[in-house]
Image (spheres, rainbow, N blue to C red):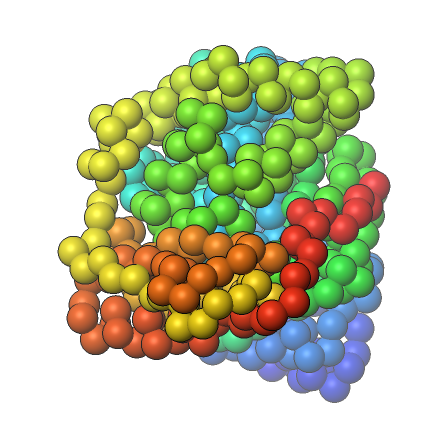
């Protein structure tokens, strides 16, 4: 088999066989296929798409590119959650400890920042010492001892996704339904999750721009999971404005810690409680989603979720002093504000622009393997439908360079549209696919 033949077949609209997909995925994971051919292949999929059969084969090939964890000797049911990516989406940092505090085992394999969307691993690495590269043995051991793991692909687990993910991030091939579905589901399957809650985002700050596109992605992933005997549901979540106030790694960790202390922004708290309720139900901890909601609220209010987060950080080698005293997290030297130059109601917040501005400040990558600055980012002070007065602060910019700060201020000043008429707040969710 020749790599160029496979690329050309897909470029010309052909359907790849299981053998061709496995050849490609395994060759790339082993390092036999170079980045430039893999980038071309991803781009052909971006333009040509894949059939459901090809997407399922791609998912399985990526999951099998490393070890497949079977965690049933540790727990009868392991739950996981994954977001399709958004701006200010730090929900995993809140719900993983919240759900694990109930006694359910949460073994989560997360990703890094992708294009304009932040990634859980980058956020966690803003806590000094936090390790995201657990080996399979460490993953199992930690799940057994602590009931919670938040780790990334190691060379053992779904390594093909790890490599393709980093490549897609910097080659413009992220927003593709088969590539996103296979990326997410391969990680979930390799990491041994039995019950998976998917948070599929749609809107300007998501890869899927409309609820209908998000539903197609959600259904694709639910079908893949069901064929592999996993319990999967997908919530279609809004991403037409950033979630919470903080965008940027350490800023988001700080907001997640505040949320676990019961002081989080209303939209983030509500979003987290809904996802946690579904995880608790799907993981059979409670008989209904309503009971899951009540339990999640209790675990948040009594501090169990926060204590589990501390335990997680300690187990993965992080400095818990930074969690106990979030002011010790990395912080930027330059802080400036963007203020409203007119009064009105917030009609629209361009979440994509906010995410891209955060990346340009240094919170994300322009090239594969680029270092990121954990301290930089943005605080958003208003939400769609809020009333704004002249001079009110809309954004706070956290930067490490005066020119970047000015560019960010300029860009953010155009990212909010104000109008005279009142508008309705945005919904948090548009529906469920199960
Ligand atoms: N999250 C993932 O893990 N992969 C994607 O491709 C997008 C979001």
Residue 223 % position (x, y): 82, 48
Judge whether 356 appears above or below 75 on screen. Answer: below
Identified at 80% across, 16% down, the residue is 287
How many dots with numbers?
Answer: 0
Pick the front one: 32 or 77: 77
Residue 427 vs residue 130, the one in the foreground? 427
Image side of residue 125 versus residue 419, left or right:
left
**Residue 241 visible at all:** no
- Between 187 and 147, the residue placed more toward the observer is 147
Note whether 228 is above or below 294 in the view shown. Answer: below
Check the image and report above or below for 278 versus 379.
Answer: above
Nearest the eye: 88 or 156: 88
Q: Residue at x 67, y 73 (%)?
A: 45
Q: Residue at x 36, y 22 (%)?
A: 310
- Percent coordinates x, y for residue 349 in the rendering: 54, 65
* Residue in the picture at 76% in, 38% down: 232
**Image quadrant containing the C terminus:** top right
x and y percentages locating residue 141 in the rendered image: 45, 20
- Residue 400 visible in the current orientation: yes
Q: Is residue 127 left or right of residue 40?
A: left
Q: Is residue 376 left or right of residue 434?
A: left
Residue 129 percent across, percent down from the top left: 25, 36
Side (left or right) of 280 relative to 307: right
Q: Quadrant location of the N terminus? A: bottom right
Q: In the rendered image of this protein, does residue 69 appear above or below residue 60?
A: above
């Amino acid at each position: 088999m020749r790599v160029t033949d496979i690329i050309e077949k897909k470029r010309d609209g052909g359907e790849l066989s299981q053998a061709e997909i496995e050849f490609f995925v395994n060759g790339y994971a082993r390092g036999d296929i170079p980045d430039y051919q893999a980038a071309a292949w991803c781009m052909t999929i971006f333009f040509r798409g894949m059939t459901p059969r090809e997407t399922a084969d791609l998912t399985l090939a990526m999951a099998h590119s490393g070890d497949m964890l079977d965690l049933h000797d540790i727990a009868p049911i392991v739950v996981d959650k994954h977001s399709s990516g958004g701006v200010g989406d730090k929900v995993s940092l809140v719900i993983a400890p919240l759900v694990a505090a109930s006694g359910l085992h949460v073994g989560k394999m997360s990703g890094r920042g992708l294009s304009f969307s932040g990634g859980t691993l980058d956020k966690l690495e803003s806590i000094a010492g936090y390790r995201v590269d657990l080996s399979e043995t460490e993953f199992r051991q930690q799940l057994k001892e602590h009931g919670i793991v938040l780790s990334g692909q190691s060379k053992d687990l779904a390594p093909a996704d790890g490599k393709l993910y980093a490549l897609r991030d910097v080659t413009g091939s992220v927003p593709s339904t088969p590539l996103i579905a296979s990326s997410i589901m391969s990680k979930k399957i390799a990491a041994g999750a039995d019950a998976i809650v998917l948070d599929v985002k749609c809107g300007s700050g998501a890869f899927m721009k409309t609820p209908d596109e998000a539903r197609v992605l959600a259904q694709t992933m639910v079908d893949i999971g069901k064929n592999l005997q996993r319990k999967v549901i997908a919530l279609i979540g809004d991403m037409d404005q950033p979630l919470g106030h903080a965008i940027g790694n350490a800023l988001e960790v700080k907001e997640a810690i505040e949320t676990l202390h019961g002081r989080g922004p209303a939209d983030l708290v509500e979003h987290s409680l809904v996802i946690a309720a579904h995880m608790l139900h799907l993981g059979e901890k409670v008989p209904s989603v309503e009971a899951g909601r009540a339990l999640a609220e209790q675990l948040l209010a009594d501090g169990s979720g926060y204590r589990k987060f501390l335990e997680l950080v300690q187990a993965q080698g992080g400095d818990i002093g930074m969690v106990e005293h979030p002011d010790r997290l990395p912080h930027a030297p330059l802080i400036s504000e963007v203020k409203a130059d007119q009064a009105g109601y917030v009609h629209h917040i361009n979440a994509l622009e906010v995410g891209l501005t955060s990346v340009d400040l240094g919170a994300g990558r322009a090239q594969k393997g680029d270092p990121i600055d954990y301290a930089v980012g943005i605080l958003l002070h208003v939400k769609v439908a809020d009333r704004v007065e002249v001079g009110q602060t809309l954004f706070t910019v956290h930067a490490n360079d005066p020119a970047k700060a000015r560019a960010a201020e300029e860009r953010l000043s155009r990212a909010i549209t104000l109008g005279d008429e009142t508008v309705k707040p945005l919904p948090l969710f548009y529906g469920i696919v199960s």
